[in-house]
Image: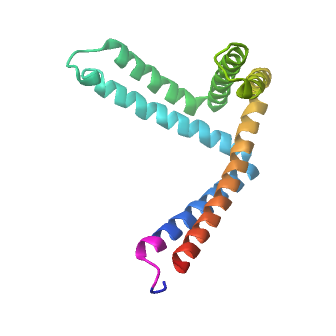
Amino acid sequence: MTETESPVAGDIFKSLLLKGILMIILGIIMLAFTFSSILAIDYLFGIVLIILGIQLLTSGSTFLGEYKRTWWVILLGILAIIFGIVAFIFPAMMTLYIVFLIAITSLISGFTDLALAISDKCGMANRALVAISGILGIILGILFIISPFVGAFVIVQVTGIFLLAFGILAIAEGYMAKKAVQTA
């Protein structure tokens, strides 16, 4: 560390460098081992559901600060735990569930964007872009519903590419920040 470089600047550089390296490694793993990445995502989703279910069960009697029993929060906690366990037993089924959830979200978003583009609530300059976004969302949703396993592979591959790109950008940002501190 030079005498003009502050300890905080060195920490920022190190954290951005570490973040970039980890993102690149994770991106390469997702691109090279797509099927294993899908299984890991399923298991992580199951863990999150179980933790969420336990949290809902424990907060069921004091939901939103009220000291009354809310049976629907407890029921939701039980369902989350059941779905979390199902994610471990049947990971392929959970993959289908996640992709269908993304497909339905994409369809709803696409139809909403298309309706917005047709209505007068969207400015003329943005109307074409919103319409294109809506059409692409609808197409993506339909493709994911038709072939959900291919959709899962596409999601993981695109995520891997984004992680690679963001990792490279984080490393470049770290070096730019270090150079800016040294020249200041």
Task: Tell me the residue at 29%/26% (across/down).
Answer: 59
Going 63% across and 32% down the picture, which residue do you hit?
A: 91
Front residue of 122/139: it is 122
Extreme residue toward the bottom, this view: 3
Image coordinates of residue 64 in percent, x first then y, are 28, 23
Residue 88 drawn above or below residue 20 = above
Q: Is residue 12 above or below residue 151?
A: below
Q: In this orientation, does residue 130 appear?
A: no
- Which residue occupies 67% across, 27% down? 99
Specify whether residue 114 is painted magenta. no
Quarter of image, res 95: top right
Could you say where residue 170 lies in the image, as x and y percent from the top left?
61, 60
Compare residues 120 and 1 and report the one nearer the observer: 120
Q: How is the image coloured?
A: rainbow
Instruction: Give the magenta-colored segment's residue range.
Output: 4-10
Dividing the picture into quadrants, the one containing residue 171 is bottom right
Left or right: residue 133 compared with residue 39: right
Q: How many marks?
A: 0
**173 sits left or right of 152 in the view:** left
Vertical arrangement, residue 102 with respect to residue 30, above or below = above
Q: Position of residue 90 (x, y in %)?
A: 61, 29
Residue at the extreme left: 67
Q: Position of residue 161 (x, y in %)?
A: 73, 49
Placement of 171 over or under 39, stated as above or below: below
Please say whether residue 184 is visible from this viewpoint.
yes
Which residue lies most toward the front here? 124
Looking at the picture, tell me which residue is in the foreground, 125 or 128: 125
